[in-house]
C-alpha cells in the first residue's frame, strides 16, 4: 500500500461518512473514526517495507495459532487473565474537556466487559458468529503507582494552553498530546503502562475531527529496526489517543452513535496488534477482497462498514466457508448498535502481542481462569486470589438467558460453606469477608446438575 493512496482512501471515507452522518454534532464536519491509516502512513514513510514485514509477523503468529489449535490442550490451558495497568492523561483546556472520574471509570469498565466477553450486547451477535466470539482474558486496571513510585489513582490531569490537538485529516499529523513540551503529557514509561491520552482532537472551525488512533506494537521486528532496540515497546508514542467526547459510557457530549464507549475498545485492539477487519486495502473497490487483515476467522470484507442494518450483507464472496461481513467485530467501523465481539484468533493475536512484543507491561496479578475455550457457556470468576474482604464476582455467560445455575463453595476440608443461585449473564457477588484466609473450591452446576466449572480459589489473601 503506497502512502499516497492512503490519502485518497481517507478522503473517500470522509466523503461517505459525511453523507451518512447528519446526526453528528457538527453537521458537515468530516469525521475520522480512527486514525490508524495515518499511523500506517507515518510508519511507512520511515520504513517503506513496513507492510511486508508486518505480513511476515502475522504469518508467524498464524503459524503459532495453527500449532496451538492442533494441540487443543495448549489453547484450552491458556487460562491466565492478564492485567494491564492503564494511565489516563486528561489533557484539557476547557472544563468540558476535563471529563469526570466517573466517565473515565465507566470507560475502564466497558473495556473490561468487552475484553472478557462480559458485555451484555453479545446478544447482538448473529448465530453464524456466536461460536467465534472470544474472551480475550485481559483486564485493565488503573495504575496505582506513577513512574516515580508515588501513589496515583491512574488519572493524570493536565491543564494546557493548547485549544486543540487536532490531527489534520488532510495531511499533517500531530502527536503533540504525547509531549509535555508541546502542551501535552509525555508518556509514562510505555513499556510499563498503557498510556491513554484524552484530549480535544477537533480541528479549528470544524474542518475535521479524529475520534481516536493508536500505535501498533512497536516491539515487533518491523518497528524495532528504526525505533526500538528492545523487545519492550519503549517508543514514547506508544499508546492510545481518544477524543474527549467519545470517552466513557453515555458521555453527554458524545454524538448519538458514539455513546457505547466502543472507540477505546477498537483503539486498544490496534495497540494490541489488530488491523481493521477489512484489511485496509489502498483501493477497496479493486483490491478490497484480496487484502486481508491477517486473521483467519474474520470473514473477508471489501471495505469498512458503518452500519449493520443489512444482516446478510456480504461484500466478498469466498469459494469456501463463505460468511457475511462481520459487522459485530470491534475492528470494523459499525460501532454503536453493532459491535460486540472479537474472534478467537484476534484473541490469540492480542495475547501473542502481549507475550512477544509488549512483554514489559506488568502482569501484576495472575488470575487463573479455567474457562474451556470450546464451551458455549463461559464461567468467569474474578479476582482470584481475592484481596482481604474484596468480594468475588461470578458470571455465567450463556445463550440461554433464563438459565439459572448453582454455585457451591467448599473450604479446603471439603466442607460446604455457601450455596447461591446465579442467573445467566448477570454478575453475582460473593461476600468473602466472613471467610478466613485460605484455599477454597468453587463449583458451578447448570440446572440439570451438570458441573460446568470447578475452580480452586484463594480468598482474602
Ligand atoms: Zn481503527
Image (cartoon, rainbow, N blue to C red):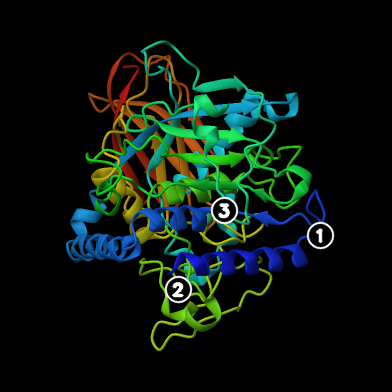
Q: Which residue lies under the disc numbered 2?
A: 299
Q: Point out residue 68 in the picture as x, y percentages from the top left corner.
A: 21, 60
The secondary element bearing badge 3 is classed as loop
Does mark 3's beta carbon lie closer than 8 Å to ligand 1?
A: yes
- Which element is circle 2 on? loop
Is residue 108 in view?
no
Q: Which residue is mark 1?
A: 22
State the mark number for residue 34.
3
Task: Give me the residue at 55% from left, 53% from top.
Answer: 35
Q: Earlier in the sequence, mark 1 or mark 3?
A: 1
The disc, 1 or 2, on the residue closer to the chain's N-terminal end is 1
**Count of residue discs:** 3
Mark 1 close to ligand 1, CB under 8 Å: no
Indicate which disc, 2 or 3, sits on the residue closer to the N terminus.
Answer: 3
Instruction: Determine the image quadrant of residue 296.
Output: bottom left
Q: Nearer the viewer, mark 1 or mark 2?
A: 1
> Are dots 1 and 2 in contact, CB under 8 Å?
no
Disc 1 to disc 2, C-alpha distance: 30 Å
> Residue at (59%, 21%) from the top-left corner?
158
Could you tell me residue 204's position as x and y percent? 74, 42
Quarter occupied by residue 124:
bottom right
x and y percentages locating residue 371 in the rendered image: 33, 47
- Left or right, residue 197 beside residue 53: right
**284 over 224 or under it: above or below:** below
Position of the C terminus by quadrant: top left
Q: Is 49 placed above or below 95 here?
A: below
Residue positioned 76% across, 48% down in the render? 206
Q: Residues within 10 Å of mark 2 (few under 14, many from 20)?
A: many
Front-most of 122 and 300? Answer: 300
Amino acid at each position: 500500500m503506497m502512502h499516497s493512496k492512503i490519502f485518497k482512501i481517507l478522503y473517500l471515507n470522509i466523503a461517505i461518512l459525511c453523507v451518512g452522518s447528519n446526526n453528528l454534532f457538527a453537521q458537515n464536519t468530516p469525521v475520522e473514526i480512527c486514525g490508524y491509516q495515518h499511523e500506517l502512513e507515518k510508519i511507512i514513510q520511515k520504513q517503506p517495507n513496513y507492510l511486508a514485514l508486518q505480513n511476515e509477523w502475522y504469518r508467524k503468529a498464524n503459524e503459532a495459532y495453527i500449532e496451538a489449535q492442533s494441540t487443543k490442550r495448549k489453547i484450552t490451558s491458556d487460562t491466565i487473565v492478564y492485567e494491564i495497568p492503564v494511565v489516563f492523561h486528561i489533557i484539557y483546556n476547557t472544563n468540558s474537556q476535563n471529563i469526570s472520574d466517573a466517565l473515565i471509570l465507566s470507560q475502564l469498565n466497558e473495556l473490561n466487559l468487552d475484553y472478557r466477553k462480559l458485555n451484555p450486547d453479545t446478544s447482538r451477535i448473529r448465530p453464524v458468529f456466536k461460536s467465534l466470539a472470544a474472551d480475550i482474558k485481559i483486564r485493565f486496571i488503573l495504575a496505582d503507582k506513577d513512574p516515580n513510585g508515588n501513589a496515583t489513582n491512574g488519572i493524570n490531569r493536565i491543564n494546557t494552553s493548547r485549544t486543540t490537538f487536532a490531527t489534520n485529516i488532510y495531511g499533517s499529523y500531530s502527536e503533540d498530546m504525547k509531549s509535555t513540551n508541546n502542551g501535552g503529557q509525555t508518556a509514562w514509561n510505555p513499556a510499563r503502562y498503557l498510556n491513554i491520552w484524552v484530549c480535544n482532537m477537533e480541528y479549528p472551525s470544524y474542518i475535521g475531527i479524529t475520534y481516536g488512533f493508536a500505535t501498533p506494537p512497536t516491539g515487533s521486528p518491523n518497528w524495532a529496526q528504526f525505533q526500538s532496540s528492545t523487545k519492550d515497546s519503549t517508543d514514547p508514542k506508544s499508546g492510545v489517543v481518544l477524543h474527549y467526547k467519545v470517552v466513557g459510557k453515555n458521555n453527554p457530549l458524545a454524538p448519538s452513535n458514539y455513546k457505547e464507549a466502543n472507540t477505546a475498545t477498537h483503539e486498544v485492539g490496534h495497540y494490541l496488534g489488530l488491523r481493521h477487519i477489512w484489511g485496509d486495502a489502498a483501493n477497496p473497490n479493486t483490491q478490497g477482497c484480496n487484502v486481508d487483515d491477517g486473521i483467519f476467522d474474520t470473514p473477508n470484507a471489501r471495505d469498512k462498514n458503518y452500519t449493520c442494518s443489512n444482516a446478510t450483507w456480504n461484500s466478498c464472496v469466498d469459494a469456501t466457508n463463505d460468511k457475511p461481513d462481520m459487522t459485530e467485530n470491534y475492528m470494523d467501523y459499525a460501532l454503536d448498535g453493532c459491535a460486540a465481539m472479537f474472534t478467537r484468533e484476534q484473541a490469540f493475536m492480542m495475547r501473542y502481542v502481549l507475550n512477544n512484543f509488549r512483554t514489559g507491561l506488568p502482569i501484576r496479578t495472575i488470575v487463573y481462569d479455567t474457562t474451556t475455550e470450546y464451551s458455549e457457556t463461559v464461567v468467569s470468576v474474578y479476582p482470584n486470589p481475592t484481596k482481604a474482604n474484596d468480594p468475588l464476582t461470578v458470571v455465567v455467560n450463556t445463550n440461554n438467558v433464563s438459565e439459572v445455575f448453582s454455585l457451591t463453595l467448599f473450604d479446603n476440608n471439603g466442607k460446604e460453606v455457601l450455596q447461591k443461585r446465579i442467573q445467566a449473564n448477570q454478575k453475582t457477588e460473593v461476600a468473602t469477608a466472613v471467610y478466613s484466609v485460605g484455599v477454597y473450591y468453587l463449583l458451578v452446576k447448570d440446572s440439570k446438575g451438570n458441573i460446568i466449572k470447578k475452580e480452586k480459589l484463594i480468598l482474602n489473601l
